[in-house]
């Protein structure tokens, strides 16, 4: 095990860092550009600056504010009353010495080491971190489009879409039907659609108790499935119906005019239809040449450096990180380890051994939460889980209550770690 | 034969030199950075999850070992603590105690 790991590190060092990339002379100010200001990009920028204060770190982010996807289900369900509570600026990270540029990266030239921005400026880099998150693959679902999302919101990028879905729930009649179209793997936030079903049920139970929720799903299994089913049964008996792959839950077409969803199992009409479309890495990853034929970014497990293009590190939902899910915590952990590896490569050293971790809390009612967690290691075969698992089934209510409270602490912690 | 041996040991030596800085396990610092995401640094304002800065080392070893080995109940830490060896737990405890 140790021998394998050592030769593995040795090989990647000689190929990746030593030969392809010249080291930066001691005392120089290397340029590091980070594209994307979510949990992954924010963390990467902050930690590169922390590990190497003389580095010139530029964070490129299109939006002035970051509305987090984590906790946006609680805005939809009404557990969080104001979206401002999950909206964060970049002032604190700027005070730490990260140069924040609000623009959009529209091109990367890996051989010249330049990033082109929509506004026309060009940024030179010694190392680049791409944390672009996801783009929607609209053509993967007939009938769905950016325009259709104004009628059938995805709410899978938080902000106006979150509020649109909330507004539609408020407007629907008691006794109506909410349809959630869940995507196939892989996708951002594996427990998200099922947490959302719980949160919508929480709103409906308290406001429109005759309503029902249908989840159409192409999958046979999903994250924390037993815990979600247990919670639905305890909290919302008879309200949520899950139609999985075996029962014909795969959606083949949506019709925003008729407000229908066509699945293998049949057609269903909804008052509110939440379509979570198929996804791929954010477009800039494709333009930089770091995506594979499925649209995601393979990385070196020991450093998060692209397996395709040296000098570019990919973190967060856009990358393929073995056993790690596409979650905010995973992005944050990947970014810290990538920052350490990136700084080491600038100093001509091998990447320090990474320690990856993930924790995802789901809250399905006020005071009812549970979690999945994992600790991961880099191996020659990829990033592997070495410990972890989900909350206990049939745990006492005090445990569910405690985990719901922990979720809020987790949120404070990750926002602070990424942007604070 | 002798020449071959010299060549071989030379190659082995080169490999050793090349990989010498690599560690076989993550440092306490690398692990600890994951901990503070939930536990928070002092300024994050955690309400329920215990803060780890200045946490007494002896107590942390007792807690983490207990979580790992199933002697202490927890909602989540029993799943996480299984990732760590005795040495890593000692190093983590020393790391946080010194903050």
Image (cartoon, rainbow, N blue to C red):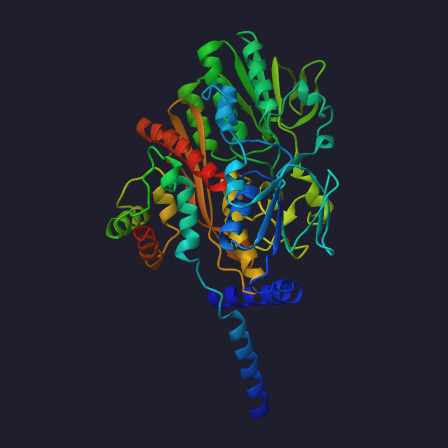
Q: Quick check: can you spot residue A302?
A: no
Farthest residue, direction bottom: B2
Report x, y in % for residue A17. 61, 63
Name the foreground residue: A362 vs A194: A362
Residue at x 65% of width, y 30% of height: A277
Q: Is residue A225 above or below residue A125?
A: above
Question: In the drawing, does residue A204 fall left or right of residue A345?
Answer: left
Report x, y in % for residue B69. 30, 49
Q: Is residue A53 above or below residue B44?
A: below
Name the foreground residue: A110 vs A357: A110
Question: In the drawing, does residue A277 fall left or right of residue A169?
Answer: right
- Number of marks drawn: 0
Name the foreground residue: A182 vs A318: A318
| Quarter of the rendering containing residue A106 | top right
Report x, y in % for residue A169. 55, 14
Q: Quick check: can you spot residue A73?
A: yes
| Quarter of the rendering containing residue B48 | top left
Residue at x 73% of width, y 38% of height: A118
Residue at x 36% of width, y 57% of height: B88
Residue at x 46% of width, y 27% of height: A229
Question: In the drawing, does residue A339 fall left or right of residue A260?
Answer: left
Report x, y in % for residue A344. 54, 60
């Amino acid at each position: 095990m140790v021998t394998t790991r050592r030769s593995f590190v040795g090989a990647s060092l000689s190929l990746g860092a030593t030969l392809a990339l010249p080291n930066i002379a001691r005392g120089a100010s290397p340029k590091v550009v980070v594209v994307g200001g979510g949990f992954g990009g924010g963390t990467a920028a902050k930690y590169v600056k922390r590990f190497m204060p003389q580095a010139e770190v530029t964070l490129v982010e299109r939006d002035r504010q970051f509305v987090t996807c984590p906790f946006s289900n609680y805005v939809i369900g009404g557990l969080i009353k104001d979206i401002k509570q999950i909206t964060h600026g970049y002032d604190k990270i700027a005070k730490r010495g990260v140069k924040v540029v609000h623009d959009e990266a529209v091109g990367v030239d890996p051989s010249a080491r330049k990033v082109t921005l929509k506004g026309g400026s060009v940024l030179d880099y010694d190392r680049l971190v791409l944390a672009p998150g996801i783009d929607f693959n609209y053509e993967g679902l007939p009938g769905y489009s950016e325009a259709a999302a104004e009628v059938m919101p995805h709410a899978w990028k938080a902000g106006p879409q979150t509020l649109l879905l909330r507004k539609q729930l408020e407007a629907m009649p008691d006794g109506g039907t909410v349809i959630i179209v869940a995507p196939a793997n892989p996708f951002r936030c594996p427990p998200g659609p099922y947490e959302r079903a719980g949160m919508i049920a929480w709103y409906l139970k308290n406001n429109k108790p005759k309503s029902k929720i249908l989840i159409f799903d192409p999958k046979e299994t999903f994250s924390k499935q037993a815990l979600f089913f247990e919670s639905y049964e305890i909290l919302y008996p008879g309200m949520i119906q899950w139609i999985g792959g075996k029962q014909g839950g795969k959606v083949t077409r949506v019709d925003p005019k008729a407000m229908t969803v066509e699945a293998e199992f049949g057609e269903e009409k909804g008052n509110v239809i939440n379509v979570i479309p198929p996804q791929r890495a954010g477009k800039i990853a494709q333009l930089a040449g770091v995506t594979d034929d499925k649209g995601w970014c393979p990385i070196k497990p020991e450093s998060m450096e692209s397996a395709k293009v040296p000098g570019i590190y990919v973190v967060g939902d856009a990358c393929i990180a073995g056993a790690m899910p596409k979650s905010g915590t995973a992005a944050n952990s990947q970014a810290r380890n990538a920052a350490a590896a990136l700084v080491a490569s600038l100093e001509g050293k091998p990447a320090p051994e990474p320690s990856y971790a993930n924790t995802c809390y789901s809250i399905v009612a006020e005071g009812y939460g549970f979690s999945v967690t994992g600790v991961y290691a880099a191996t020659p075969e990829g990033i592997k889980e070495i410990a972890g698992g989900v909350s206990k089934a049939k745990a006492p209510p005090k445990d569910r209550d405690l985990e719901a409270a922990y979720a809020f602490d987790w949120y404070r912690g990750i926002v602070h770690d990424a942007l604070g | 034969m002798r020449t071959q041996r010299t060549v071989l040991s030379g190659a082995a030596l080169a490999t050793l030199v090349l990989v010498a800085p690599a560690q076989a396990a993550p440092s306490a610092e690398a692990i600890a950075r994951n901990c503070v995401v939930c536990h928070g640094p002092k300024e994050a304002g955690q309400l329920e999850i215990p803060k780890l800065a200045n946490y007494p080392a002896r107590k942390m070893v007792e807690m983490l070992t207990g979580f790992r080995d199933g002697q202490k109940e927890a909602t989540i830490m029993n799943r996480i603590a299984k990732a760590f060896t005795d040495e890593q737990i000692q190093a983590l405890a020393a790391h946080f105690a010194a903050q």
